Amino acid sequence: MIAIRVDTRCGLGHFMRMKWLAKALIEQQQQVIMLVDEHTVPVRFYHDVDIELIEVPQQPNTVSDAQFALDMLGQRGDKVSGWVVDGYGFDVQWETHIRQSGVPLLAMDDLAREHAADLVVDAKWQGSQTTLRYDGKLAGHSQTLLGPDYCILAPEYHNPEAQVRDGGLLFSLGGGGDWRVPAKWIARLLDAPPEGLETTEIQVVIGPKATSTEQLHILAAQHPRLTLIEQATSLAPYYQRCGLFVGALGTSLYELAATQTPALSFSLAVNQDNALADLEALGHYLHIPDLLAQDTHKVIELIATLYYERKRVHQLCTKAVVRVDGLGAQRIASALLNGTGAGLTELRDVNEQPQISWTLANNLRLTAVTDAHINRYLSARNRSDNAWRMTITDRINEVDHYRWWFRQTRDSFVLLQDEEPLLYVWHQCTTIDGQAYLFGGWFAASDAVNFVHAQLILQWQLTHTAEVYPDAIWVAVINKQNRFVNLLNERAGFVALADNEPGHDAARRLFPNASPADFNFVGKYPPRTNCE
């Protein structure tokens, strides 16, 4: 028999993943008993799996909880061959007490806490740091199973059905969450929908521990296109149908990855905070931890923009280098029963080469920017050594950036040094009063950028745009304190624009935040100036 102690006081997320682990163990001819906190788990959440539940009353401390579990199973005469524990309320003392029974113990975690268990499982992905998460935090006998290969999901997430994506917007906060702010978003989407979303279906998953849901029920009574999903035991079919998911990033991260669902996520708890690079490895690029604190109007515009561009967002999901295949429960069950030892999730080789690239030097390569650069582009733009040179010096937040990114029409490129971003360069052509004008810029993505790199990229840009836009006039504004770029552009043939020149007026219109007191207005004329 395998005994599972799971914390169910703060929601049913831990219970659900233990349910699926129990199912995998039962498939291996194991009997499973689960110990849960009393009065917390409705029958509907486990009636479809052959497990027995024992309710544990509130105990004064973790050692007492462990002893209660041992005594209860001892009184019943159950012979336990393995223990599993899942919950933040169980600590090293709990684990040590259980191990004194002489039975192997497996502990689930995602916060990199200290453990005394024989096997520690953590599905969180932190790139190269994944293997280091538990350094100095484990007993000498402990082994680990790390990364999304050991993420426990419902069986239907393995080989999910083909995606139709005709289900509109899907909102979820997981098993709990406070709906006050998301309800305001949903009310705005229903009462004053952005253009194109007037008939879009909206589905809201309400977990058993959710709070502040009254407004959602009022809205559902008023708007037939709003559907409230309560008492759902699996969200897989909803993920597979929705055009865009908006919600908290808990277990949903792995469910979204398994179904390649376009998503905008935010954080409700510390275990939902992740480095963007780690989320990108799973194909999830659009995460704003403090989205609930952002301006409602801007959030609504962002949701609408992402829904319009959901095919592009879905393409990002397919770029995942870490695959979630829904077989985590089976791998953990096998490790627990067969003692297979430590395990680590490996990266998948996507091996996508850009269609066009330019080699500027032995280790310098230029490629077109794709949507996969959405976060690195912002990170580079917000570097302090870049921002002061801009016409807009304030830090740009993620909501504004994501809204802009999917609407902008720049031609953007990234200069790579040994395949790592060194700088970003962009340009755009527009017509003003019948004349074609080019404007653009560049900004560093690394401390390694120097004058040679900037000179190389400017020479390439001027040559490239002369071929693509032969009749366009280049205009630029350069901070007067930026001697580096002023000298660079002067050497490249840019000259000061007089106040009465059309190019000066064009520059003022293209860069409305640049004042003549702080910026030099310069231009570079082509051999011909008539638009084709």
Image (tube, grey):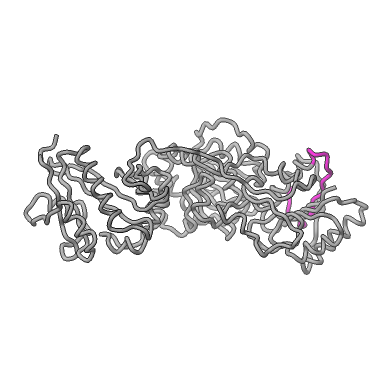
Q: Position of residue 95 (x, y in %)?
A: 77, 61
Q: In this view, does 527 lie to the left or right of 194?
A: left
Query: Camera-side residue: 417 or 86?
Result: 417
**Residue 225 appears in the rendering:** no
Q: Position of residue 342 (x, y in %)?
A: 71, 50
Q: Is residue 269 magenta?
A: no
Q: In this view, does 155 lie to the left or right of 241?
A: right
Q: Position of residue 460 (x, y in %)?
A: 25, 45
Q: Quadrant of the C terminus?
A: top left
**Residue reaching furthest to the left:** 500
Query: Camera-side residue: 414 or 510?
Result: 414
**Residue 358 appears in the rendering:** yes
Residue at 19%, 53% in the rendered image: 476
Q: Is residue 41 magenta?
A: yes
Task: Please give the range of residues in magenta.
Answer: 26-42
Q: Position of residue 114 (x, y in %)?
A: 69, 64
Looking at the rendered structure, the number of numbered marks drawn on it comes to: 0
Q: In this view, does 88 lie above or below 27?
A: below
Dividing the picture into quarters, in which one does residue 116 lie?
A: bottom right
Residue at 65%, 36% in the rendered image: 156
Dividing the picture into quarters, in which one does residue 11 lie?
A: bottom right
**Residue reaching furthest to the bottom:** 60
